[in-house]
Amino acid sequence: MNLTRRQFLTAALAGTGMAAAACRSAAESDQALVAITLDLEMSRNFPAWDDTHWDYEKGNLNAETKRYAVEACKRVKAAGGVLHCFAVGQTFEQENVDWLKEIVKGGHPVGNHTYDHVNVTATKPADLQFRFQRAPWLIEGKPAADVIRENVRLTTAAMKARLGIEPAGFRTPGGFSAGLRDRPDLRRLFRESGFTWVSSLYPPHKTTQPREQPGVDVYDSIVRAQAAAQPFAYPDGLVEVPMSPISDIGAFRGGRWKLEWFLKAVRLGVEWAIEHRATFDFLGHPSCLYVTDPEFRTIDLICDLVRKAGDRAAIVDLGTLAARGRLKKDGGSSPKE
């Protein structure tokens, strides 16, 4: 039996047992499962194009970013869903995290996004993060693998200390076209760190030159990539919950797109998921969106598309997408563009 969005949210707020049952019901249904996710970090080039200092203080969130995240969560909840956030551990060094407690109190899950926004696929310390290039003494003598593991551990510890919660899944900073298919060492690290699912795969697709309006070929490529953004289980049991293209950073930083161009790409992706009763994982960053989409048009568009789909679709968290992914084994490599 299909689960309505309101029923899912009610169950999620009522307790872990009911939430787990609701999650299984939604995962096993033939509904389209649409997730809205925000990576809570600062982004270079925003709000001003020459802003690059955020590379060194990814978790030092400004007031605008916090306000955008809180309001986005309220809008998604009003639409009968939840919004899945991912926090950088540095954020918990800030004096006040009441805004994030408000998000958690509203029933929205928050996952682990590493402490320093490190590249988890790095094999050399110099490739981990800009911060460690400027201040190499912070990790002097430590192998990259040890720094990554500690980054994951510290973020979990910070979330427990400041929010009183365990992280709801793990998302890698940056996305990889093959996910973690070629990194069994990282899959083992995340399993040993207590995670049953990760979000690391971002399928390749065509894009544009800066400020060039995307044509039919680009939009078609983005829609085709949705098939490669479906959750699945790696051979060792860890579940992958891919990010659906195109992300706000890919559009507004990489392509310097106009908002209308981005909205069209998001609409086409969500409509594909609804038509095929598949999943869609919107990847956004409030530090980018408060500049490029201050009126929350992207969030509202996704909620409206799901509302119009009725019982054919639901707004859910990534844990629900992961539950569906457990039913599907890895089908191979991502398509190349």
Image (spheres, helix red, strand yellow):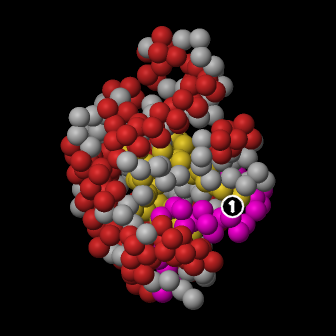
Compared across the picture, whether 196 is left or right of 249 comes to right
What residue do we see at 37% from left, 48% from top? 164
Seen at 35% across and 29% down, the residue is 57
Q: Residues within 10 Å of mark 1 (few under 14, many from 20)?
A: many
Q: 284 left or right of 268?
A: left
Please report the residue visible at 47 percent of the width from the left and 33 percent of the height from the top.
Answer: 154
Identified at 37% across, 40% down, the residue is 161
Q: Reply above or below: 146 against 334.
A: above
Query: Magenta region: which residues?
Result: 311-337
Q: 57 or 195, which is in the foreground? A: 195
Question: In which quadrant of the rendered image does the N terminus lie?
Answer: bottom right
Q: Nearer the viewer, residue 255 or 167?
A: 167
User: Against 146, is 133 above or below?
Assistant: above
Q: How many marks?
A: 1
Callout 1, which amino acid? Phe
Which residue is labeled 1 in the image? 232
The x and y percentages for residue 100 are: 30, 50
Nearer to me, 322 or 18: 18
In the displayed structure, 305 sits above or below 111; it is below
Quadrant hosting residue 147? top right
- Determine the secondary structure under disc 1: strand
Q: How far across and how far down the image is residue 18, in percent?
A: 49, 74
**Whole-percent x, y for residue 269 in the image:** 51, 68
Q: Is residue 296 visible?
A: no
Q: Is residue 172 above or below residue 142?
A: below
Q: Is residue 31 left or right of residue 65?
A: right
The answer to whether one can see residue 195 in this image is yes
Q: Position of residue 123 (x, y in %)?
A: 66, 25
Q: Which quadrant of the figure has residue 58? A: top left
> Is-magenta flag for residue 218?
no
Tell which residue pokes out farthest to the bottom in this image: 1
